[in-house]
Image: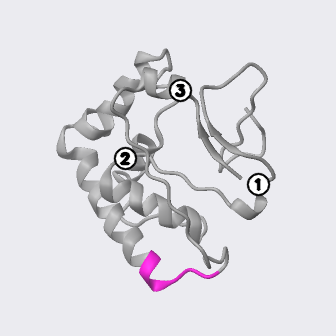
Amino acid sequence: MQFIIDETIFENFAGMKIVVATVKGLKPTSQGQAIDEHLNRGWQIAREAATAYGNPQSHPFVKAWGDAMRGVGVSRKKFPSSIEALVRRAGKSDSPFKINPLVDFYNSISMANLVPAGGFDLDALNHNLELRFSREGDTFLALDSDEAL
C-alpha cells in the first residue's frame, strides 16, 4: 500500500507540512490510561483556544485552516476543518468525548497542537491511501452519521 499525495495539494496549500506515522498494537476496544491522559490534556488546550481570541475560528492556528480552505472555494461554515470542530466542542464541555482508542489518540494530537489530524485502519484498507481534492461522485461518511454525503 502507498500513501499518495496529489501535486495539486501542494500547489494550493504552499508550505503545508504532512506528518505520517504508523501505530501498531492499538486495539479498538482497549482504551489505555496514556491515551486518556493525552486526550484530557489536548481537550484542555482546545478549551483554552476556544475563547482565547473570542471564538474558535479566530484563533490564529484554526483561522489559518479556515483561510486555506476558503482559498480553494470550500465554505468554512458548511465544512469546518476538524480542528475547528474539535475546538468548538471543547469550548462547550468540560470533559472530552470518546469514540475509540485510535480516534481518541489522533484527536488528542490534533487538539494539543491545534492542527487537523486523522487516522486510518490500514488493515481495513484494500487500496492506496490518496490525499487529493474531491471528485464528482466521491462520498463521505461522517463519524456521527449513518448516511454518506
Question: For the residue labelled by badge 1, is the local secondary structure a helix, a strand or a loop?
Answer: loop
Between 88 and 6, the one nearer to me in the picture:
6
Residue matched to label 2: 115
Residue matched to label 1: 125
Distance from Cα at disc 1 to Cα at disc 2? 24 Å
Query: Foreground mark, 3 or 2?
Result: 3
Distance from Cα at disc 1 to Cα at disc 3? 22 Å
| Rendered position, 110 above or below 33 | above
Q: Position of residue 138 (x, y in %)?
A: 75, 28
The amino acid type found where label 3 is placed reads Glu
Mark sitting earlier along the chain (1/2): 2
| Rendered position, 76 above or below 123 | above
Question: For the residue labelled by badge 2, is the local secondary structure a helix, a strand or a loop?
Answer: loop
Q: Residue at x 20, y 37 (%)?
A: 54
Mark sitting earlier along the chain (3/2): 3
Q: Position of residue 147 (x, y in %)?
A: 78, 39
Q: Which residues are magenta?
A: 30-35
Mark 2 residue crowding within 10 angstroms, few (<14) / some (14–19) / many (20+): some
Query: Foreground mark, 1 or 3?
Result: 3
**Circles 3 and 2: CB distance less than 8 Å?**
no
The amino acid type found where label 2 is placed reads Val
Q: Quadrant of the C terminus?
A: top right
User: Is residue 21 in view from this perspective?
Assistant: yes
Q: Position of residue 49 (x, y in %)?
A: 25, 49
Between 76 and 106, the one nearer to me in the picture:
106
Q: Residue at x 49, y 15 (%)?
A: 73
Distance from Cα at disc 3 to Cα at disc 2? 21 Å
The amino acid type found where label 1 is placed reads Leu
Q: Residue at x 72, y 46 (%)?
A: 128
Q: Is residue 65 magenta?
A: no
Residue 7 is marked as: 3
